[in-house]
Image (tube, rainbow, N blue to C red):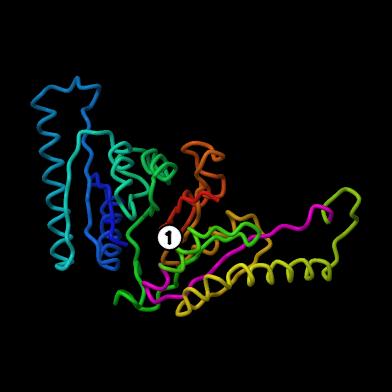
Amino acid sequence: MSRPVLAGVDGSERSLAAADWAAREAVSRGVPLHVVHASPPLLGGVVPGTAAQTLRQVGERMLQRVTADLGTRHPDLEVRGEQTADAPPDALLARAHEAGLLVVGARGSGGFEGLAVGSVALRVAAAAACPLVLVSERPLAAFGRGTGAVAGAAGIVAGFDAHRPVGEVADFAFAAARARGVPLRVVQAWRLPAEAVSPRTLFVTEEDRATWEDQEVLLMADALRAWQDKYPEVAVHADVVLLHPAEALVNASQGADLLVVGRRTGPDAAASRLGPVTHAVLHHARCPVAVVPHTG
């Protein structure tokens, strides 16, 4: 929790929403906020010197306005702005190694109407060394009762697999719920056993389905017990649903403060790649999404 929160801005509405979200998170954690604006040379450096200088000055003024505004609205927050000539993904990924959290807008000033997630957001989400939060729009209830923000926040939602529980994702979700003083909804999607949908099976009875679902519920309760003991102040609601994981999480994101999912790293994981569930969630979730890297 001693590492700063890092936010990338480019002047777009979504990046400003991300900076606002990041400032609130930094205040909650009691750490500084580092705001980065990347302004690389355009067209391979062919832009005339005067035009390039003008672009840099525009970026500098924008960055100054953002940091000044955040400092005014959060007087106890230490805000530092930095402009770099690196490409935006490279600048953010390099600085993410020293950050506790990276926050970006789902789409910047580029792209086209209807594009849900831009290329920069996807690249940093797939490769950041620290947890990342993707903000698609300005959240109305970004933080819950614990930080004195809008009351009645819906809480945190976390994707969970009781068969392969991931400690990093669970810890992030439980800690986020505790910090905000809101409940945590843990969602596990399950499927019918392979033998239940084989060509030799004529039908699945409701009794069979209820038995399998009860087994999933018990397995999830057992898997969550360690984190409930670690975070006793967090109210937990376990939700076991017979759906595709991405569909279950997107449905659960409606009205939530934050949706937490994982991204596998390590030698056995595809380099700088998002899994299909996380990729789908980033494009369709209805709240900010936290992507937590993990090795398991």
Could you say which quadrant of the image residue 191 lies in?
bottom right
Residue 178 within the segment the image draws in magenta: yes
Mark 1 lies on a secondary structure that is loop
Q: Circle 1 sits on which residue? A: 287
- Left/right of residue 22 with respect to residue 286 in the rendered view: left
Image point (28%, 56%), residue name: 3
Residue 40 place in picture, x, y as percent: 22, 32
- Left/right of residue 204 with respect to residue 251 in the rendered view: right
- Count of number-bearing discs: 1
Image point (47%, 48%), residue name: 283
Dot 1 amino acid type: Cys
Instruction: Work out which residue is located at the far top of the displayed protein and give it.
Output: 46
Image point (35%, 63%), residue name: 139
Image position of 174 with respect to 90: above or below: below
Residue 64 within the segment the image draws in magenta: no
Residue 190 place in picture, x, y as percent: 68, 60
The one of 41 and 223 positioned closer to us in this rendering: 223
Residue 69 place in picture, x, y as percent: 15, 59
Q: How would you rate the neighbour count of disc 1 (Cα within 10 Å): few for under 14, some for 14-19, many for 20 or more?
A: many
Bounds of the magenta segment: 176-195
Image position of 229 with respect to 281: above or below: below
Q: In which quarter of the image is the N terminus?
A: bottom left
Residue 266 place in picture, x, y as percent: 51, 42
